[in-house]
Amino acid sequence: MSVAAPVPAPPPLPGVGPAQPGDEWDPLVAARTAFFTRAGAPASQRSGADPAPGLPGALTCLLDAEYGPLPRLLPPGSSGPPAREDAAVASLRRACRLDVPLTPDALLAHGEGGPFLAAVLTETWPATVRRHGPAWAEEALRDRLLDGGAGAERTELLLDLAEAAGLRPLGAAEAADIAARSGRTARHALWRYLHGLPEGPAHLPPASEARDVHERLLLAPLPPAAATGWPDDGLVVAQTMLLGQLDRPGEGASGGLSVLLGGLGDALTGTEEVGVVVTVVLAGRDDLDRDRRLLVRRRGGHWLLRLPVDAPAAPSQHAMPAHRASLAWWATRLLGSLPRACDVVHVRYADDGSLALAESAARLGARLVFTATPDPHRRLAETHAETGADDSGGTEALRADLHRIFLADRLVERADTVIGIPDGSGTGQLLRHFPALTHRYGPEGPPAPPEGIAPYEPAKDEQDRRHALLESLFAGGDRPDALDPADRDLPLLLCVGRLHPVKQQELLLRTWLTADLWRRATLVMVGGATRHPTPDEHRVRAVLAALVTGRTQAARRLALLPALPNDRVRRLERALADPGHGVRAWYVCPSAKEEFGIAVLEAMEAGLPAAGPQRGGVSHYLRDGVNGVLLDTGSASGLSRGLHRLLSLPESRRGQLARAGQETVAARYSVAPMAQALAGVYRDAGRT
């Protein structure tokens, strides 16, 4: 594999803002600022003796490869030569960021590589076609498709490049012949390609020859979308939730975003600007075997669009690169089949799935809105501070983080509108990690509409249901999902969230045990799937179980509940907050960081005093000692101090914090103003 030629440094980019007061020197910020400005990092970041003491080889090597040639921001001699594929990926990323396209042949010479290389090839290809012409590009694709040596992933990549540029390197008969001799991945890619040729569908096998539900959907003609309930006016907005399931928060990758988008989609259709909201989710083969519907009405003008994925279940974020080409095709096909054209596509998360939907928006002529966050940017240096050049696992994780940072840059570049998530510094952290946004939006940064939660809708027999939930919770300490009724007078710590290392349920349980907090308070954790748990859920459950093994007394004061529907979680929180039920409860979020913390807001709205992490978006609305407690979740000792502190507060103070939290949510964090603000963003971005 050849390595791309060195790319010159970028021209100056005026308007890149300085670091925020108190920001520590960050090698990623320094490298990116220097790349985008050619002037090096701001003086406030260069101050001090040694700006990068002890930075290991892996971090300096890969940063220097991707953002060089740069002023020497790192200690001399600390960066060794990158591996061959790392060098190719880094050089191509520079070319892509600078819009310096290679020739079609030179670019496709890099086709043999992993998903990080495939992503940058895909992003660079459109500029190559524009610069060097479709004829050359189509000929280069055809040569490689017919050379007989293309593997399944390479065939899929080549055909995706053709689709993105509207090229037709193979005739229908040729494509059908290759498909008949190919394995599953290449065969599916060729079938998708045939759908786009005028005579292509006639060369597809009959649906009766499909091996499973995914192939049946791929081969069958697309049924007309249900037109009932589609108004003639108002924008058609597609919002994406490609990780987890919309109505199953707390299971797998489903968390606060699923709750947010469910309520937000409902609320948006009540605004003047938006007529229909389509929430886009993924459906694996097992999901489609249970329910083959691809378009499902959720409520009113809010619909659910299920994109088929050739996997048993919806893939994790790490597995998303393998499905990017397929997702772009399915999204284009299904969104394009709606009764009305899609005006706006709103993507969240910097991953390959979001880029697939961004590509679909471009093919459909829809406007793209991207919610950008400085993640994994702000934790990159800290996370990989100990990663040595000989640490293969750590280096691969670093490569994955740099890949996501590149994807975020591409989404910012592609988006018609970028929005942020409000935090304690406004959009300061976002501008620090995305220098180009200052040039685009000025020192105030992009818009950051307020976020909020949907109103709780009590059931007709609400009080009976609350009573039943509490009775079930205190059904006996010998059960893993219940507490001893005798401990009902102890303070109760409630933690709700998906089981994932970033949520740090292990840290909370370990701290509760080792700091002897179990003698003072009970602990209830809610989250995790019971059917088809993910590897992360398996690992977290195993760790939690191991921590309480042999600790019989403590285990009686611990309840581990599976994920509950959102209405049951909010009902449980209200039951625990009701003084008439005699429970003194706190809501505790031990996460390493939260972008916003929908679950924290819901607990505050229910009347529970809440404690959440100092880092991330929670501190934007939770003020320590005013309407809740901020916790140092960076270590067991820090969390222990915070938990001891909140458990030592008198009951009157606990009640004051709870009431203040409720007032904060009621005044500022309803989903209605969030929907109204976003509708304005969509109106300004959407087609007229």
Image: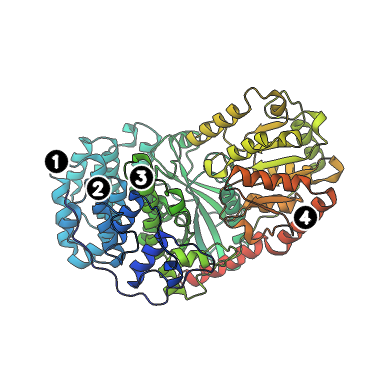
Please tell me how crowded label 1 is: few (under 14), some (14-19), or many (20+) other residues with Cα within 10 Å: few
Is 433 or 1 nearer to us in this picture?
433
Please tell me how crowded label 4 is: few (under 14), some (14-19), or many (20+) other residues with Cα within 10 Å: many
**Mark 1 in CB contact with mark 4 (< 8 angstroms):** no
Secondary structure at numbered mark 4: helix
**Mark 3 in CB contact with mark 2 (< 8 angstroms):** no
Please tell me how crowded label 3 is: few (under 14), some (14-19), or many (20+) other residues with Cα within 10 Å: some
Tell me the kind of residue under disc 4: Leu
The CA span between labels 3 and 1 is 40 Å
Front: mark 1 or 4:
4
The answer to whether 460 is drawn above or below residue 8 in the figure is above
The answer to whether 71 is drawn above or below residue 321 in the figure is below
Q: Which residue in the protein does label 2 denote? A: 83
Tell me the kind of residue under disc 3: Gly
Please tell me how crowded label 2 is: few (under 14), some (14-19), or many (20+) other residues with Cα within 10 Å: few
Q: Earlier in the sequence, mark 3 or mark 4?
A: 3
Front: mark 3 or 2:
3
**Mark 3 in CB contact with mark 4 (< 8 angstroms):** no
Q: Position of residue 176 (x, y in %)?
A: 21, 41
Is residue 336 among what the camera can see? yes
The CA span between labels 3 and 4 is 45 Å
Q: Which residue in the protein does label 1 denote? A: 148
Q: Which residue in the protein does label 3 denote? A: 388
Q: Earlier in the sequence, mark 3 or mark 1?
A: 1
The CA span between labels 3 and 2 is 14 Å
Q: Position of residue 600 (x, y in %)?
A: 66, 51
